Each structure stands twice: as C-alpha cells, then as structure tokens.
Image (spheres, rainbow, N blue to C red):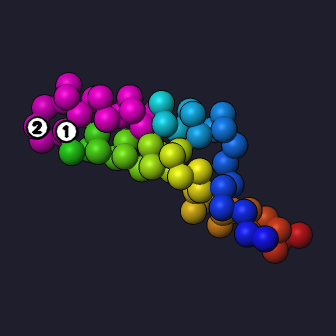
Amino acid sequence: MFNFTNINYFERFVRIMIGLVLLCTFLLLPDQYALLALIGLLPVLIGIVGWCPVQAWLEKYRNNGS
C-alpha cells in the first residue's frame, strides 16, 4: 500500500510554524521584497498535506543506492 505521508507530526508542525512566520513577514517587508515572503506558502502546504516531494525523492534515492 502507498503511504501518502512521509513526514511525521512534529515535522509537520514545525513546517507549518515556519511557513506562518514567513507569511507574517509579508506584512513587514517593503513592497519590492514582500513577494519573497510568499515562499512561506510552500512549507505550510507541505505541513498540511504531510507529503514532501523532496523527502520522497531522497528516500527513494537512499533505498536504491544501497
């Protein structure tokens, strides 16, 4: 059976918190840099879904390499 989550609950919580902090900086940065704060959407979405494509690729790479 395929496992749809590859990050644990603590890591999900940390990713969501880091993402929210980055999104909050959207309000504090000047207009020209504010769009950079939208990068915070990525860890929030990964934390909510519970699946990280980079981590899935690394696990596959580690399993095939040994």
The count of marks equals: 2
Question: Within the image, what quadrant is residue 37 found in?
Answer: top left
The residue furthest top is 28
In depth, the one of 14 and 31 nearer the eye is 14
Magenta highlight on residue 24: yes
Dot 1, crowdedness within 10 Å: few (<14), some or many (≥20)?
some
- Residue 39 in the image, given as x and y percentages of width and height: 34, 46
- Residue 1 in the image, given as x and y percentages of width and height: 78, 71
Q: Is residue 58 left or right of residue 44?
A: right
Magenta highlight on residue 46: no
How far apart, in angstroms, are the residues tagged by discs 2 and 1? Answer: 5 Å
- Residue 50 in the image, given as x and y percentages of width and height: 59, 50
Dot 2, crowdedness within 10 Å: few (<14), some or many (≥20)?
few
Question: Within the image, what quadrant is residue 28 found in?
Answer: top left
Q: Is residue 16 left or right of residue 39?
A: right
User: Is 63 located above or below residue 39 in the figure?
Assistant: below
Q: Quadrant of the C terminus?
A: bottom right
Q: Is residue 46 left or right of residue 27?
A: right
Q: Which residue is mark 1?
A: 34
**Which amino acid, by three-letter code, is at mark 2?**
Asp
Q: Which residue is mark 2?
A: 31
User: Is 29 located above or below residue 9 in the figure?
Assistant: above
In depth, the one of 38 and 3 nearer the eye is 3
Name the residue rendered at 73%, 69% in the picture: 2
Residues tagged 2 and 1 counted as in contact (Cβ below 8 A): yes
- Residue 64 in the image, given as x and y percentages of width and height: 81, 74
**Which amino acid, by three-letter code, is at mark 1?**
Ala
The residue furthest left is 31
Give the extent of the magenta segment.
18-34
Name the residue rendered at 68%, 55% in the picture: 6
By secondary structure, the bulk of the magenta-drawn segment is best described as: helix
Question: Within the image, what quadrant is residue 53 found in?
Answer: bottom right
